[in-house]
Amino acid sequence: MIDERRLVDLALRLVSTPSFTGSEQAAAELVRDEVAPLGLQVQWQQIEDGRANVLATWPGAGGGPTLMFNGHLDTSYSGREPWLQGIPGFQPEGFERDGRIYGLGISNMKGALAAYVEAVRALMDAGVRLRGDVVIAAVAGEIEKTQEGEAQGAEYRGYAAGSRHLVAHGGAADMCVLGEPTENKLVLAHFGTIWMRLTTRGPFVHTAFSSGRLAENSIVRMQALLGGVLEWLPQWEEEMSYGDVRGVANVGAIRGGFGWRVSRTPHETHVYLDLRVPPSVPMAEARRRALEYARALDGVEAEVYVTAPGAEIDPGHPLVGALEQAHAEVFGAAPERDVTRWFSDASVLSRYGIATVNYGASSGLPDAELGENLEIDGLVKTAEVYARVAQAICGVAE
């Protein structure tokens, strides 16, 4: 049913179209131009200059649910980062080698976008008519990032920016499959996150006049604070567990002073915390707990600047059953279920009443020396699963 060559060619073209966060429009145009000739109804959503969503609908005969396949266009990196040079899987240049596809975004998640399109094409080629609509949503701005400090502009507007626009402008469905790289496990829940900034302050004076004032230095004050923060993080992890899955927290960044002028004591120093929150804990409650801890610290200012909720789906939901059955038919064994501590657009979609499961091919990321890559056979089978799920959920018209 699935045309492997057609699927691979589209995946390679997507990977070879750079679409770093904030510059996704060229990739959106590629998707639009790919699906329009199939007869799908295409809605172009211009988010801002250089950024767009594509919402393509295959209308059903009527009487069935609407199933969305959602995938983000933006990539985690641009490929220009100095530390990624020489790593082929982190460059926006797709290629095949030994039964795998390599290139920036192939696993996260342009391979899934290509699989969505191929699944619909395969059903059309087979003369299948569904009762419910199938929607392919190619969205901008999913990657976990946000504007902060001097980091301003479109390239920092992530964390489901595209899917928020999508659902506010007609992108509704009964259910959704998100093809994030899950190693073909069914992710029935994932954590959300709080990003919190802790700030210490001190005098801004020339080093020549700082004798005897080292304890006032904002970096030194932060150093004294950090030990206590590290002792508190395991407590957060324990309190924010989800069943058998322990919570997780990270010290993600520290910033203070001016490297180009270290002859001045820094007037402020910041530590940035990534505190993962399970879907079972309301975000307002998690925010309150984080700030209660931070506000009890002496001489520290605290601000929560990201609140991105997690998501979950009832294990007995029909979409879960359809995915499990299709996976077993294609792969020959039942899929594993999983709970992850990474974020996805299910956070937004589920809050619009769209029951969502993350299910996609292997990430290929354990092979860090080569960067992002996907096994072609696994991608073909994943596309076949998507086609079968569309039939099971939307229903086949007589």
Image: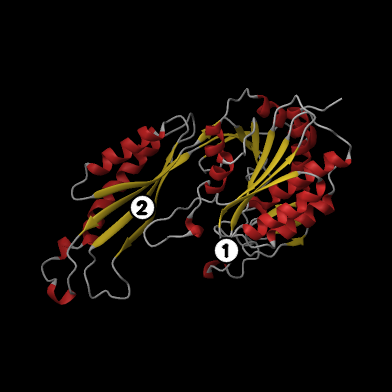
Which color scheme is applied?
secondary structure
Q: Residue at x 64, y 50 (%)?
A: 109
Q: Residue furthest top?
A: 316
Work out which quarter of the rendered image holds the N terminus and state it: top right
Q: Is residue 188 left or right of residue 68?
A: left
Q: Is residue 125 left or right of residue 27?
A: right
Q: Residue at x 42, y 31 (%)?
A: 281
Q: Residue at x 55, y 57 (%)?
A: 21
Mark nearest the camera among 1 and 2 is: 1
Residue 367 appears at what percent x and percent y?
Answer: 63, 56
Q: Residue at x 39, y 56 (%)?
A: 148
Q: Is residue 197 left or right of residue 386?
A: left
Residue tagged by mark 1?
Answer: 78
Cα separation between marks 1 and 2: 23 Å
Say if 63 sits above or below 75 in the image: above
Q: Which mark is residue 147?
A: none
Element at label 2 = strand
Say if 318 sits above or below 25 in the image: above
Going from N to C along the chain, the mark reached first, 1 or 2, is 1
Q: Residue furthest left?
A: 212
Residue tagged by mark 2?
Answer: 272
Q: How many other residues sit within 10 Å of disc 2, few (<14), some (14-19) or many (≥20)?
A: some
Write down the quadrant of residue 203 in the picture: bottom left
Residue 254 appears at what percent x and percent y?
Answer: 34, 58
On the question of residue 104 being in view, the answer is no
Camera-side residue: 391 or 314? 391
